[in-house]
Amino acid sequence: MTDERPPAVLSLRSATLAFGQRTLWSGLDLDVAPGEFLAVLGPNGTGKTSLLRVILGQQRLTGGSISLMGHEVHDGSREIGYIPQQKPLDPGSPLRARDLVGFGLDGHRWGLPLTNPGNRARVDAAIAAVGATAYANTPVATLSGGEQQRVRVGQSIVGDPKLLLCDEPLLSLDMAHQRGVSELINEQRTRLNTAVVFVTHDVNPILGMVDRVLYLAGGQFRIGTPDEVLRSEVLTEMYGTPVDVIRSRGRIVVVGAPEHGLTHHVEPRAPHGPISPAGGAL
Amino acid sequence: MHTMIALATDDPSVWSQIFGFQNYGELLALVKNSIIAGAVLGILGGLIGPFVVKRDLAFAVHGISELSFAGASAALLIGANVVTGSMAGSLLAALLIGVLGSRARDRNSIIAVLMPFGLGLGILFLALYKGRSANKFGLLTGQIVSVDNPQLTLLLVISAIVIVGLLVVWRPLTFASVDADVARARGLPVRTLAIVFMILLGLATAVSIQVVGALLVLSLLVTPAAAAMRVTSSTLWTPVLSVIFAVTSVVGGILLALGGGLPISPYVTTISFTIYVICRIVGWRRSKRGAYDRRTLVRVGR
């Protein structure tokens, strides 16, 4: 091994996660390097979000081990930036875009929310980096979904995290904003050399940025570059049913994949099964 | 100051009962303690209120206050300190709600189960109590006019503890209240903060009951904050306005109630309600005017 890669930000060794009789994945070995962009794909119920919960220390592995920056995981970490799904915020909540970003920097500190000039400059810089300066002082609840997710990216990077966890951050955004927000995440990871673990059901908006894919389906997983994993033979084997991966105009469409990943319990479908929604969702 | 009576053309006796200002100066000296207590409780209610609204705990406040009432009436029955009894009931309720009801739906059913039980216990203890009946009624509707020095000291100490506690956890509590998932991912002890807040809320409820009574606590712990949040979105102005509204309601209520010999709580609740209505109208007119300029909300609020 002459590989001189820097130590991994995130390491999983023989990691297994099961709920009762149901094993979501087992024997998962994974190292995510600084600056690497990993997309976690697969149908619903295969443990994509559970993987994030494991990394956040909110869910224990059934077997194997996980380490973050070489240490055990705890309940959350200041080394992690987290971008959740866009969801409507309570319109009455007194919170400006600037406040939300500020929490990403010093939300853990005791006392009153008085920001010192140094921190204010960092918050301003993060807001500028995501192009949200125009609405920095606007209540978050009144922003559009795309604007809110831009602010979320700002919040996630303002503390210079080593790892960015993205839980379906593009869900409920239109195509233009999906592209805008994912480019933003990609820019920040390049600028800060942050590792990105990006959970999504649709790889297309991030296809050009992804280094590796972790595909979860049918109690199995595959890790590799998009070209290695997103192929008809690979997915057919995982799903245990004929699946076609069609590449068209730079987009990937998966045809024939069952909606849920538990193929052991799913009757094989007709050769032309349901086409996943939203123009080629994975 | 006698002009209010002149309005009462139809039935002077009712009006002079509601607004009486004879011998006002001497009365004022008698209730100095109450006014101090009222102002401190206004500050407390105004500061904790925005968190109650943000964390969606208005119903919890009501539930806590009924168990607090049970505790206070038990104390009255056995001759113990009423404030201590009320605090014991509050804290027990707040902890139960905090530990068992971390999710909103669980929480609401737990509160709905606790509330009638607490009220029932309170009624039982009061029925057994053979003392002055004014004391009984005071627990439900407020009794601050009779605040004496040791009681005042106790109220002030508890209020100070709650206010200092709030200032210490202010920032992480705000983060955890408005953005719990991200706060937890960033390593904040979200669950511990929730329990700490419930303890502070239990103490705040127990002292507020001494002013407005168990039934009307919401007018002090929720209405001022809800009113403030109608007219501003600023993290600074929300608590400031909320405190101003709460202090105005309590102190104004005490001053107005002074001459009439009626309980102060209707005055407090009416002022607090009026402020809320005005804020709603102001907020509504502003959003209508600036319907297409969302920045207006902030600019005015800052």
Image (cartoon, rainbow, N blue to C red):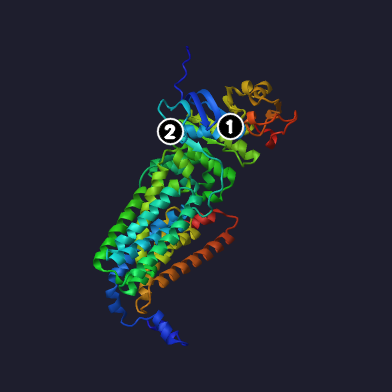
Provide the secondary structure element on which disc 2 rests. loop
Residue A95 in the image: state x and y as whole percent. 48, 50
Residue in the picture at 56% in, 54% down:
B294
Relative image position of residue B295 (x, y in whole percent): 54, 53
* Near-viewer residue (A100 or B118): B118
Q: Position of residue A45 (x, y in %)?
A: 59, 34
Q: CA distance from mark 1 to mark 2?
A: 26 Å
**The C terminus of chain A is located in which quarter?**
top right
Pointer 1 local density, CA inside 10 Å: few below 14, some 14–19, many at least 20: many
Instruction: Please say if A183 is above or below B204.
Output: above
Which one is earlier in the sequence, the residue at label 1 or at label 2?
A: 1
For label 1, the SS is loop
Observer-side mark, 1 or 2, equals: 1
Find residue B189 and report its image quarter.
Answer: top left
According to the picture, the residue beneath numbered tag 1 turns out to be A46
Q: Which residue is at the front of the view, A102 or A130?
A: A102
- Identify the residue under disc 2: A79
Q: Residues within 10 Å of mark 2 (few under 14, many from 20)?
A: some
Q: Is residue B128 visible?
A: yes
Q: Position of residue B38 (x, y in %)?
A: 34, 66
